[in-house]
Amino acid sequence: MRIERVELYELSLPLERPFAISGGVMRERRSLVVALHGEGHVGWGESPPFELPFYSEETLAGARDLLERVLIPRVEGRTFDAPEAVDAALRANVRGNNFARAGIETAAWDLEASRRGVGLAALLAERVGVEPASSIPCGVALGIPDDRNVRTLARWIEEAIPHGYRRIKIKVAPGWDEAPVAAACSVLAGTGIPLTVDGNGGYEWPGHEASLRALDQHGLLYIEQPLPPDELVGHARLAHLLRTPICLDETLRDARAARQIVALDGPTVWNLKVHRVGGLTEALRVYAIARESGAQLWAGTMPESGLGSQAALAAAALPGFVFPSDLEPSTRWFGRNQDVIKLTMDAQGMMRVPGVSVGRMLDRARFQAASIRLRPPPR
């Protein structure tokens, strides 16, 4: 795998509706896109940290700086045996910065996919000796309404149900939890659609134990990331206190964290986000630990554009991803004819897993209209 030239872009896609979680609000999806050129092929990857550090310590500006000054020079003009070797080169003497590394790392996998004329899912399945699924189930993620009105949330859920989603997820935060959950349960009664909640690390242990115990009464599929990312012990204890399974998201930052979760007899539902763990190579390491330990997986998103979502879609096609993913149709996030790769979902809430590389699906006109080339600078 010869990487002859690297291009870096900033991609900006306005959201159809502001998306609020416990830590902040997003109105536009800005991310970095990496294009690796080699031997007549191009591999595409996305680096999607937020502009402010309310989800993780990493920010968009920091990722760009590291990519331009440190990471891109490590791969440009070099030959690698496989994407795993690119991952190793990016990791050397770089702590964290998973989103920055993931931009190049996922592009390296796509470069191999382009060279071999296959999709990302086929490459991952080949590495672990399985057959990938041809389609994956999808769920919808609903943020906190601006007006903090449970009727607004109920209306959003009512609007989502006819689309066929296999799971409804709502964001919760201290002071916005029991009432919206009760409202959501009322709307979903009799539909058979499971409900999950996501705290994005907004609750403290043990101070908010009573609030989390109150959520245990509603028959949720799981409670996602209630405590801060570094609260491993609190999550392990909470998993044994509640009947409702605890799901880890931000805590599951790499295979090292996964091993500690298993050693602590911690939560066994894991939201595996490819970009948050640093790319597909590390995602496969986490996947192996999950399969050995019996943890149940599903694929989360940031959300990324349709370009970056291809990595999550490929991972979700592996056996062991048992819950609906956060992958949603492009129109849900960005409206009609805006995303650079259009994601679609059928009436049964299923999304097809592509069998071609990212570049084969990329709408170049939309990408050009929504992006600015950062490196090399436009002439």
Image (cartoon, grey):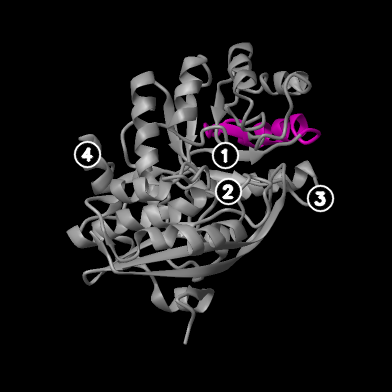
Q: Position of residue 85 (x, y in %)?
A: 29, 48
- 10 Å neighbourhood of mark 3: few (<14), some, or many (≥20)? few
Labels 1 and 2: the sequence-earlier one = 2
Q: Which residue is mark 4?
A: 131
Secondary element type, mark 1 = strand
Secondary element type, mark 2 = helix
Amino acid type of the residue tagged 3 in the rendering: Asp
Labels 4 and 3: the sequence-earlier one = 4
Amino acid type of the residue tagged 1 in the rendering: Ile
Q: Residue at x 42, y 45 (%)?
A: 91
Q: Which residue is mark 2?
A: 160
| Residue at mark 4 to residue at mark 1: CA–CA distance | 28 Å
Labels 2 and 3: the sequence-earlier one = 3
Q: Are marks 4 and 3 in contact (CB under 8 Å)?
A: no
| Residue at mark 4 to residue at mark 2: CA–CA distance | 31 Å
Give the mark toward the camera: 2 or 3: 3
Secondary element type, mark 3 = loop
Labels 4 and 2: the sequence-earlier one = 4
Q: Are marks 4 and 2 in contact (CB under 8 Å)?
A: no
The part of the chain drawn in magenta is 174-197
Labels 1 and 3: the sequence-earlier one = 3
Q: Residue furthest front?
A: 93
Please give the label number shown on residue 345.
Answer: none
Labels 4 and 1: the sequence-earlier one = 4
Q: Position of residue 374 (x, y in %)?
A: 51, 73
Q: Residue furthest bottom?
A: 379
| Residue at mark 1 to residue at mark 2: CA–CA distance | 8 Å
Q: Which residue is mark 3?
A: 147
